[in-house]
Amino acid sequence: MNIPDDSEDSAAGLPSYSGYEFQILATVWVSLELISKGQAEAIVVEPPSEEDIEVDLEFDTFDADWGVKAINLQIQVKLRNSTPWKKNDFNALLSARKKRGDSGPDPRIRPLKYLSDESSKQYLLLTNTILDIGLADFRVTQMGDLSKANRIPCARSDDPDLACRIGILPEQNEEVLSLKLRQILGSIFHVPGEKVEQCLRELVDAVRARLLGRRANRFSKSEILNIVRRFGGSYLESN
């Protein structure tokens, strides 16, 4: 579960609660965005990797030799105060941490490890704030896009093939995500305007139940479409 860093602003209320609510909203948006584009059959909330979201993405390519390409996308959702993300901050998310003492648990596998082990994996940081200029090459505009990066922050050597599989989707604050969600529900899933808020609350509750361990962590396309249809929506799938 996403818990804000100690450096984040706690003056505006309980930071851990704000981060929790932001994670829920971001998860709903990721689900609707990918399913509306036909790129996913399900998303996994709180996956075994211990990131916040996991999804197997499928998308068409123009290369006949590739046909349909599939990637495993690991998404970390981070709520932060107004300070930009800098290289050291981002590197702390990517790099392995040392074990605390002989009897303590092993630290979880960090993105640099699983990206090195499996070339089909990509990592995305979804965050509400802006990036320092030093991270500009990691910026992406769509989930699943490769970044322009060719070097990991603070790494000892260049590794373009790995670096380009790391991306950051910044400036996705609560207001931006809320607006996007309402647009998707209305224009793509055709939920009547008077039912959009109710439908959104139902989707939020479905994700919250998974974060609380009350539902299986797989949030499927069929379940999402069932919720949409209960509120008068529809979705025409392309072949």
Image: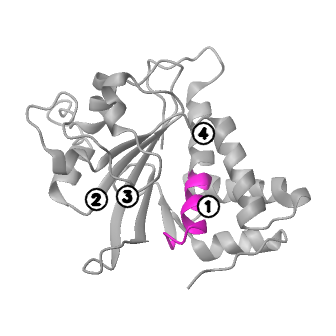
- Marks 3/2 in contact by CB < 8 Å: the verdict is yes
Cα distance in 3D space between marks 1 and 4:
16 Å
Q: Which residue is mark 4?
A: 22
Q: Which amino acid type corresponds to the residue marked 2 in the rendered image?
A: Lys
Q: Which residue is mark 3?
A: 73
Which range of residues does the magenta coloring cover?
A: 27-41
Q: Which amino acid type corresponds to the residue marked 1 in the rendered image?
A: Leu
Numbered marks: total: 4
- Marks 1/4 in contact by CB < 8 Å: the verdict is no
Residue depicted at x 61% and y 33%? 17
Q: Earlier in the sequence, mark 3 or mark 2?
A: 3
Cα distance in 3D space between marks 3 and 4:
19 Å
Q: Is 39 inside the magenta-drawn segment?
A: yes
Against 136, residue 192 (above or below) is below
Q: Which amino acid type corresponds to the residue marked 3 in the rendered image?
A: Leu
Q: Earlier in the sequence, mark 2 or mark 4?
A: 4
- Does residue 49 appear left or right of residue 59 in this picture? left
Quadrant of res 90 = top left
Q: Which mark is residue 121?
A: 2
Q: Residue 155 or 164: which is nearer the viewer?
A: 164
Q: Earlier in the sequence, mark 1 or mark 4?
A: 4
Q: Earlier in the sequence, mark 3 or mark 4?
A: 4
- Does residue 22 appear left or right of residue 61 in this picture? right
